[in-house]
Amino acid sequence: MIIKELPVDKWIDHLKKHPVPELMDEECMKALENVRAEYGNTISHGAGLEVRLSEEARYADYIMNIDTSEIPHVESLWYELDYAAFKDEKKEIIPCLFANISRDEDGSYNKTRDETLPAMMGEHRTMLLKKAFDDVVSRLPKGAHIKQVGSMSSRGELDIMRLVIAFPSWDLIPEGLSDIGWQGDTKALQEALAPWKETGMAAVNIDLGENGVLSKIGMETSSRWRQPILVDKFIDRLEAAGLCIPSKGQALKRWIRLRPQGDPFIQTLIAYFKLAYKDGRISEAKAYLEQSPYIHHHYFEGYESPVRLDVKLTDGTKEMPYEKAASLIKNAAENGVTTLHLYGLHNKNLLQKVMRLCDDNKILPKIVISDLKDADPLYNKNTLLKWIPEKGNFPELSDTAKRAEELGIREFIVSTGALCSREELEKAAEFINKWQEDEKHEMSVAADPCFSQLKAFMGGEDPKQNPNRGIESGCMAGRAFFAVRPDGSFSPCLEILETGTKMSDTTGTEADNVTIREYWEKPVSTLCDGHAETCGGCNYKRRCRPCPAKKEWTESCPLRIIQ
């Protein structure tokens, strides 16, 4: 589901889909087409905006992360395009460049100085600043390191470089800056920083000239890992201090609450704020808005549109008419659905037609089976085998997976079945881990998100280390997908029976009367989290969202461990 690189076109399209007019007016949005014309097909690992929070002017600088093979010891560069640099379509776009760097094995920055900087900034500027760079490096306080170097050529700053220095704690910034040669008043800086003190590592932007560190500095603060409510409080503090006008503050709060786009994955967040210090006070604040292809925080409850549909073509008594299937697939494509899981495969003729429809609409069809006897040689590459554990059949797991791979099946997941013991869970986890570590396999093997207990168990008891987080931590019904029955009725999941507990007011809605978008915008994602009273005290609870349709599994889960 998570795609980690996209062309610049996609980032701009997403931004235009979610405009923030308080931050970027129509003229600025229109000017982004100049960026598209220059870089549209260029692959970027993320994009973003630099926003000046205290200014009424509604424009932003544009940022992209792009691979490079031209700068030694640097894998990618951050391109920062000032609005003035891309506003005029007739003007050549010259970016400011930032590169992440690290120490050499011996603890020095000699490779950066001798190889990276000349390629990035030119031989002349490097020679001009070499002595000042070495001086800063030699005077870095214990625990501090240079994390980025920047070239601000587009601004005409051809005789300086930007350094971003990470300090191990906020308290060490004034003294640390003095250590590396900053000539400002450290006491005044300490007083100015006091209201904004943050815990953890802090990064400071300095400009380095031929004669050393210049007076201009900026503090990066507020980590991307913080939840929106905490970021809100920081924005409120900026507004109270006159560093952020209310309209831009409200726009930032909306930005961090946009639901992620499911596939390709795009998440909006604020990477950090930067506080500019000048003449003894914090003079300006900026926010660095990010469009990221990676999951950074885990507080969203669902994707903005379904990533997939689970479609049951036949159930033994009812069959979905071809016309209904065609309408459904067309509607799915229009709403960004990229995958269909197909169940109920009794009518091979209907299945063939549906597969062609998916291909025509650029949707990936996956035929879901639970028994290898149902595998069809024509579609094995599109087959997903859901292996259902039952009491006593765990020894069959390895042999079943091997046979499935021999048949050409590409995806195998261990899903929920009858209750099993902790020992059986351990064996399943051990098998999955070994299979995933063996690179020779062409078939993937994983734990089904529906089998949240197994996924959580595989991640370990420490909730800070367990990667089974957020929307992907378990049941994704109504969060990433929903289901369609043969009669066209919608349901959060095929496992949720209409005769059982009603999970949503919209369960059973006819596809003929309600579109996918309309159904998704109803409170499908307000499903219960699947936990039972017996989950209290379990070490895995924060990283587990059990299947709400299998209460017996949750209430008797063998993972429950009281701390």
Image (cartoon, rainbow, N blue to C red):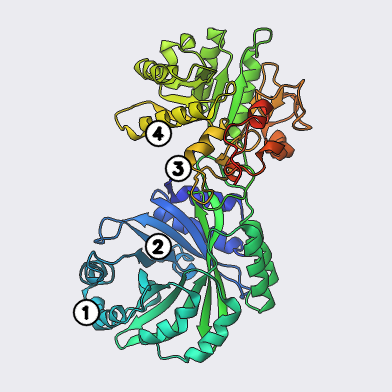
Sooner in the amino-acid sequence: mark 4 or mark 3: 3
Disc 2: which residue = 79
Secondary element at tag 4: helix
How far, Cα to Cα, is label 1 from label 4?
52 Å
How far, Cα to Cα, is label 3 from label 2?
21 Å
Q: Residue at x 56, y 57 (%)?
A: 269
Q: Residue at x 42, y 12 (%)?
A: 378
Q: Residues within 10 Å of mark 4 (few under 14, many from 20)?
A: some
Q: Position of residue 352 (x, y in %)?
A: 51, 13
> Is the Cβ of the residue at disc 4 closer than 8 Å to that at disc 3?
no
Sooner in the amino-acid sequence: mark 3 or mark 2: 3
Disc 4: which residue = 433
Q: Position of residue 317 (x, y in %)?
A: 68, 7
Q: Is residue 162 visible?
A: yes
Of labels 4 and 3, the one closer to you: 4
How far, Cα to Cα, is label 2 from label 1?
23 Å
The amino acid beneath tag 2 is Tyr
Above or below 563: residue 440: above
User: In the displayed structure, does residue 245 sit left or right of residue 199?
Assistant: right
Above or below 152: residue 354: above
How far, Cα to Cα, is label 2 from label 4?
39 Å
Q: Position of residue 394 (x, y in %)?
A: 47, 20
Q: Residue at x 43, y 65 (%)?
A: 80
How far, Cα to Cα, is label 1 from label 3?
41 Å
Mark linked to residue 65: none
The amino acid beneath tag 1 is Met
Secondary element at tag 1: helix
Mark linked to residue 3: 3
Sooner in the amino-acid sequence: mark 1 or mark 3: 3
